[in-house]
Image (spheres, rainbow, N blue to C red):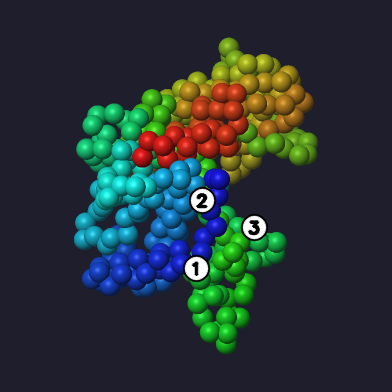
Amino acid sequence: MKYYKLTEKDLEKCIDFAVRRYFAKKGNPNRTTGQARGLGAMINDWVGGKAIEIGVQRILEQFSDSKELELDFEVYNRIAQDPDIIKVAEKGATKVRDPNVYVEIKNYSENDRWLGLSMEQVNTIKRSKILNGDPEKAYIIYASLNDMAEDKEKRLDLLGAFLQVATKEDYAKLFEKFVKLGDIFVKVNYVLSLKDLEDHGTIFKRGEKVYETNIFKEVRKDVKNLEEIQIPNGIIPKLYYGGHPYPEKIGDIKVEGVIKMYKKQNKKKTTFFVKAETECIVENKVLGMYNLVKGKMYRFEFGPIGRNPDIFRDVIWISANKAKELFGGDLKLEEVVEKRLGEVAERI
């Protein structure tokens, strides 16, 4: 029930929104370059996110036989400050009502390392009358676009999928290399409350770095010419990783078990490795927990990630790695997501 297959009607609604937004914004300037954006850029910017909102809406409705939810598809000349689900229609009621909880829907990629909001978004949500001071009445739902196409050479692109079914037969062949519409679905990956984020997240300031959280990558072959590094008191040493000083905000990376740590130096960079001498648990208050298998060697890839790792505004983030274990207990992550979705559908 955490999945929803997108339909032609869904995509038509999303593209209609992008077209209306294109004509509503004079010149459609790109916020980074200041240059005018064409219709294609507007579709690329908006269709995926709105399609994910529809998917989450339909998934939540699967958890309730008595509620229909309404999304916000209005085009504003300001930054929208309303929740993504703006109205609720209950079976037997004479009119729709406002939601009882605030739902923020976010696009999630499997490559995302962090979950969270800008501090500006947090403050906007807190000002909503829906919360009335209670951060447990706000939920952030992270969902992704996926496909079940058997042909792995086909590309997942919503506009390409829409044009397959919307164009005349003479032009349809132009788009046959895209995943077809019936194979595209929305999946919910995480559901956090604002209280979860505030209790377990970390505030990063503008100008600080985005850090890698998938820090242990298994090495499949022997590595030569290694220099051993001492590990005092079971804490990974705070060295320069990725060419940058160790961020004190991350805190200690603690090891339960026995590891050996090495570095390999060449002219351009230093690469670090960890070998698990026993079964190990590595834990950090910000990054989360990692299990290392006895006898295996790992490349230690802690440090800033991406070509431009600078954060451009104040944010509060929780690592996706930490979120996987934080709310699990005896349940698997998928079971936790199901439970949380049911909770949102009941409370909204």
User: Which residue carries the number 2 mark?
Assistant: 144
Q: Residue at image x 42%, y 26%? A: 200
Q: Tag 1: residue type? A: Glu
Horizontal side of 269 relative to 201 (left or right) equals right
3D distance between C-alphas at marks 1 and 3: 17 Å
Q: Check residue 148 in the rendering and tell me which mark sits there, or answer none.
A: 3
In this rendering, the answer to whether 115 lies above or below 274 is: below
Q: What element carries label 1?
A: helix
User: Which residue carries the number 1 mark?
Assistant: 8
Is there any visible trace of residue 316 in the rendered image? no
Picture coordinates of residue 151 (x, y %)?
A: 70, 64
Question: Are the residues tagged 3 and 2 within 8 Å (C-beta)?
Answer: no
Is there any visible trace of residue 131 in the rendered image? yes
Q: Residue at image x 36%, y 40%? A: 348
Horizontal side of 23 relative to 266 (left or right) equals left
3D distance between C-alphas at marks 1 and 2: 18 Å
Horizontal side of 259 relative to 251 (left or right) equals right
Q: Tag 2: residue type? A: Ser
Q: Is mark 3 on a helix, strand or loop?
A: loop
